[in-house]
Amino acid sequence: YLGQVVEEASTEELFQNPLHPYTQGLLSCIPHLGVKKGEPLPVIEGSVPPLSKVPVGCHFCTRCKMADQHCMEHEPPACEVAPGACSEMLEICRIRKAGGVKMSEHLLEVKHLKKSYPVYDNSGKLFAKKKHMCAVDDMSFFIEKGETYGLVGESGCGKSTTGRTIVGLNHADSGEILYDGKDLCKLSDKGFRPLRKDIQMVFQDTLSALNP
């Protein structure tokens, strides 16, 4: 909610036993069989605040019926909660039952990634200076185990360059790309080769990239 992770669990656990008030509010809005025609669905009261007025504490506190002064002043830490326990906690981190994998483990972490491309001067000057165009400037994010991550941005903002650099098709100017504890930026082409089975790119035109 407003960029703040409020609850993590397997799909089955999340739908059967939602613990965070925001998750409960979202699932209560789903139509169910037996609802009388014309009967209004439950709604989450209030509206999402603008990004210029994000609450200091829990981001959901302005719309939460359980919020108190502490919620408004302090961001709640992620905590591991047993089903049904500590229902007043506003930030919940659950352990996935399959394999016992903890969702807070970073599978991939990008730190302060920078990548630029040379831009050549076509003016015809003999001693024209070579310029550089910065495609990615100080990019940082992480992807957790079991997570699907979407990188969204306008055309030309560096999404493709970031992806190409992660899979080793580009070399970063600076920064770190940590995969399972290894810094991919420090690997040679030969050193990257064993990881090709784990890190691959699926191109947009899959019919021309893959054999159906």
Image (spheres, grey):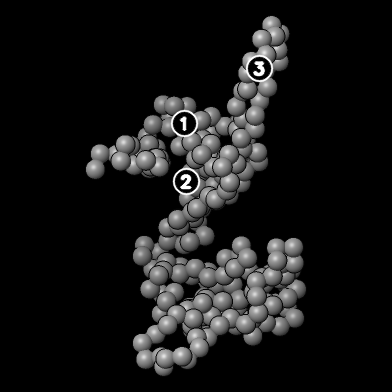
Residue 19 appears anywhere in the view: no
Q: Which mark is residue 180?
A: 2
Q: Which residue is mark 1?
A: 169
The image shows residue 104, relative to residue 130, as above or below, that is below
Mark 2 residue crowding within 10 angstroms, few (<14) / some (14–19) / many (20+):
few
The answer to which quarter of the image holds residue 175 is top right
Mark 1 or mark 3, whichever is nearer to me: 3
Instruction: Report how far apart the C-alphas of labels 1 and 3 lie in the structure.
Output: 25 Å
Mark 3 residue crowding within 10 angstroms, few (<14) / some (14–19) / many (20+):
few
Instruction: Report how far apart the C-alphas of labels 1 and 2 lie in the structure.
Output: 19 Å
Mark 1 or mark 2, whichever is nearer to me: 1
Q: Residue at x 65, y 79 (%)?
A: 46
Residue type of the residue flagged with mark 3? Asp
Instruction: Report how far apart the C-alphas of labels 2 and 3 lie in the structure.
Output: 41 Å
Q: Position of residue 100 (x, y in %)?
A: 40, 64
Seen in the image, is 139 located left or right of residue 170?
Answer: right
